[in-house]
Image (spheres, rainbow, N blue to C red):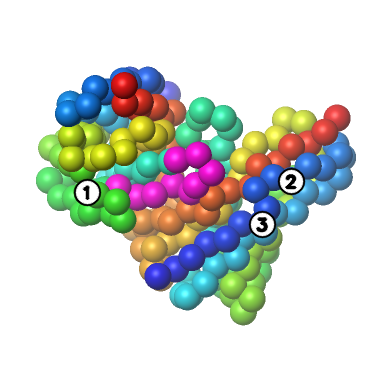
Amino acid sequence: DGGITQSPKYLFRKEGQNVTLSCEQNLNHDAMYWYRQDPGQGLRLIYYSQIVNDFQKGDIAEGYSVSREKKESFPLTVTSAQKNPTAFYLCASTEIGARYGYTFGSGTRLTVV
Amino acid sequence: SQKIEQNSEALNIQEGKTATLTCNYTNYSPAYLQWYRQDPGRGPVFLLLIRENEKEKRKERLKVTFDTTLKQSLFHITASQPADSATYLCALPYSGSARQLTFGSGTQLTVLP
């Protein structure tokens, strides 16, 4: 079955550590996105990529980094510069040139310990 | 910048009734609007997309309207069931017809048996 796989489902980070969240899709979608969701708030866009080897900052990119070396993969690194990283992280993808809905992964819940 | 408001954080209705959720937006004219369903601890699932030149769209028990003059979308679930209980999010493109979406904070719907 086609879809988006996010891993791990739960992740614990110590102060000062960088951690990487994985996002893989086999839908052949060109565009991929990372959102952050905090309780009682909507999804906020961190980074997005519309084509391999290219990506753009969203509204809250500070303290995060991404890469897009393959069409299928769009990993997100939460760096130590992100002061409040505890949140639910969602990866999504969609087709290029079409106004279709996003397909989301099941999310990664990151907690700072 | 654009702003999305969804009515009340929580809505409780009796099984069999029609649930009506509201999404208001300001400051721009989106080319389309989308609705998603999100269950606790899961990623959102795309439900419907409605374009600016469409007044209404239906899918099974779901109906969405889009009033570009009022800058409002209404989302209806007819003959509601307890299984419809979830948080419903509306989403609009960041600008015009862009594919990057901005999301409302959602309305939590509970259908009581």
> Chain ID for label 2?
B
> Around disc 2, counting alpha carbons within 10 Å, would you say few (fewer than 14), some (14 to 19), or many (20 or more)?
some
Circle on res. A62: 1
Q: Is B78 positioned to the left or the right of A72 in the image? A: right
- Does the magenta-highlighted stretch encompass residue A37? no
> Around disc 1, counting alpha carbons within 10 Å, would you say few (fewer than 14), some (14 to 19), or many (20 or more)?
some
Q: Quadrant of the C terminus of chain A?
A: top left
> Chain ID for label 1?
A
Q: Is B99 positioned to the left or the right of B66 in the image? A: left
Q: In the rendered structure, are the residues bearing label 3 and label 2 in contact, judged by CB atoms less than 8 Å apart?
A: yes
The residue where tag 2 is placed is B11
- Does the magenta-highlighted stretch encompass residue A39? yes
Tell me the magenta residue range. A38-46
Q: In the rendered structure, are the residues bearing label 1 and label 3 in contact, judged by CB atoms less than 8 Å apart?
A: no
> Around disc 3, counting alpha carbons within 10 Å, would you say few (fewer than 14), some (14 to 19), or many (20 or more)?
some
Task: Work out how far the residue at label 2 is from the one at label 1, CA to CA, in angstroms.
Answer: 35 Å
Three-letter amino acid code of the residue under disc 1: Glu
The residue where tag 3 is placed is B7
